[in-house]
Image (cartoon, rainbow, N blue to C red):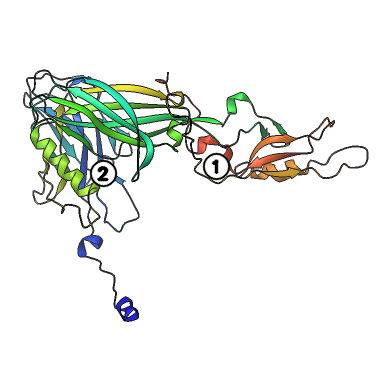
């Protein structure tokens, strides 16, 4: 019976899996508070596609006010468009105009700017549970003393120091192995990532407009992010009730599906429309207002001593020895002959020098992912780093 039950199982591919979709996705907020506005344009892809994102290039984007003012955004590449720093009048309403290379025009609804209250603090607490394990839970606190905001959204940018598994003290110059210059160190790097989840908070059901310890990001105790020094820049946006409902449904549809206990997908209705073809769906909700931000740093010394970062690759060093000395005491540099053509595939770490010898008898080397941190980060310290 089990055999026949298994043999009768057939894959089910609903039409939505294979249906081609190429709808415009608009992400961003019109920043009215003396900073630049950044808008990200992309296209949807089918669920069975190998692509995760398709940036929309060559578009013309303009911020328009109901007082007949307009401000252009400049294309920065990879679907990112940005304006100069703008301080826009709070008495006007604003919308976004987008013209794509296929000749279609998109407009968002006019929205009234909202003043975002400051972030009170960003903190962290150590947690341990069976589902996520031990780690660091970072949270945000804020409030509006005027009791006017009620709806909040956050995104963040993470930066951290991490090290390669092995330090490389040598490099080849094309003919021999020499000491690695300090300017070419590849042991310490800075990593970076941006938030991908939708983080929301609401005080609408509370008597006071207070958000207390709203969780932002969980970092496992074994993560490289907290092995040395970690920083997070949090941006806070005040939302209207309509904008909050839009992002709540978007979060439900994209992050809270997958099990039989999750809620069913809901229809997503934004405030961006295609004026060229009114039946064409558009994904996006454009708000306007000021943006508040705060950066904090967390040192490894502030965390439990038994939290040890796990290196993401299996690393085992190997050795390459010289051939036996030739007559007259000269060494044939076999290791250099072997390594020079492979400078992109091996990293020379340390020299092997026998006791009493004046010159190395060989070198130790590892794979690049184990000895070159620049594969996954940058050796240049960020300008904001403290």
Residue at horizontal 24 percent and vertical 47 percent from the top: 255
Q: Name the residue under label 1.
A: 369
Vertically, is 70 above or below 256?
above
Q: Residue 372 in the image: state x and y as whole percent.
A: 56, 37
Q: How far apart are labels 1 and 2 at the CA level?
A: 31 Å
Q: What secondary structure is marked by label 2?
A: strand
Q: Residue 264 in the image: state x and y as whole percent.
A: 15, 54
Vertically, is 292 above or below 8?
above
**The N terminus lies in quadrant:** bottom left
Determine which quarter of the picture holds residue 338.
top right
Residue at horizontal 29 percent and vertical 21 percent from the top: 294
Residue at horizontal 20 percent and vertical 64 percent from the top: 15
Disc number lying in front (1 or 2): 1
Tell me, yes or no, if residue 82 can be seen here: yes
Q: Is residue 170 toward the left or the right of residue 381 in the image?
A: right
Q: Is residue 41 toward the left or the right of residue 330 in the image?
A: left
Q: Which mark is drawn over residue 269?
A: none
Q: Nearer the viewer, residue 47 or 123?
A: 123
Determine which quarter of the picture holds residue 240.
top left
Callout 1 crowding tier (Cα within 10 Å): few <14, some 14–19, many ≥20: many
Q: Nearer the viewer, residue 370 or 26?
A: 370
Q: Name the residue under label 2.
A: 42
Q: What secondary structure is marked by label 1?
A: helix
Q: Is residue 361 toward the left or the right of residue 298 in the image?
A: right
* Mark 1 in CB contact with mark 2 (< 8 angstroms): no
Q: Residue 139 in the image: state x and y as whole percent.
A: 28, 29
Q: Residue 342 in the image: state x and y as whole percent.
A: 64, 45
Q: Nearer the viewer, residue 186 or 91?
A: 186
**The C terminus lies in quadrant:** top left
Q: How many marks?
A: 2
């Amino acid at each position: 019976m089990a055999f026949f039950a298994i043999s009768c199982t057939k894959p089910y591919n609903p039409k939505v899996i294979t249906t081609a979709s190429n709808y415009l996705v608009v992400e961003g907020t019109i920043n009215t508070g003396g900073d630049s506005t950044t808008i990200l344009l992309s296209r949807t892809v089918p669920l069975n596609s190998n692509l995760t994102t398709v940036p929309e290039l060559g578009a013309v984007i303009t911020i328009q006010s109901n007082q007949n003012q307009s401000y252009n955004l400049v294309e920065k590449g990879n679907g990112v468009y940005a304006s100069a720093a703008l301080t826009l009048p709070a008495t006007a309403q604003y919308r976004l105009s987008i013209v794509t290379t296929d000749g279609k025009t998109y407009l968002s609804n006019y929205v009234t700017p909202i003043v975002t209250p400051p972030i009170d603090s960003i903190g962290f607490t150590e947690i341990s549970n069976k589902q996520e394990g031990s780690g660091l839970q970072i949270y945000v606190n804020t409030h509006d003393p005027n009791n006017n905001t009620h709806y909040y959204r956050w995104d963040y940018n993470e930066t951290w120091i991490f090290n390669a598994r092995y330090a490389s003290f040598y490099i080849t110059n094309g003919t021999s192995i020499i000491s690695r210059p300090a300017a070419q160190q590849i042991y310490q790097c800075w990593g970076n990532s941006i938030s991908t989840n939708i983080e929301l908070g609401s005080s609408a059901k509370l008597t006071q407009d207070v958000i207390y310890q709203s969780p932002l990001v969980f970092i496992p105790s074994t993560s490289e992010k907290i092995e040395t020094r970690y920083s997070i820049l949090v941006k806070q946006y005040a939302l209207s009730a309509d904008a909050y409902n839009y992002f709540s449904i978007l979060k439900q549809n994209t992050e809270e599906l997958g099990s039989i206990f999750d809620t069913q997908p809901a229809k997503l209705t934004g405030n961006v429309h295609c004026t060229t073809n009114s039946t064409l769906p558009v994904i996006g909700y454009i708000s306007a207002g000021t943006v508040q931000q705060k950066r904090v740093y967390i040192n490894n010394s502030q965390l439990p001593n038994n939290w040890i970062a796990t290196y993401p690759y299996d690393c085992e060093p190997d050795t390459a020895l010289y051939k036996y000395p030739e007559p007259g005491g000269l060494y044939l540099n076999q290791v250099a002959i072997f390594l020079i053509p492979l400078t992109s595939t091996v990293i020379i770490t340390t020299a092997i020098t026998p006791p009493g010898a004046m010159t190395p008898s060989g070198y130790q080397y590892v794979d690049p992912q184990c000895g070159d941190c620049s594969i996954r980060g940058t050796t240049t310290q960020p300008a904001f780093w403290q």
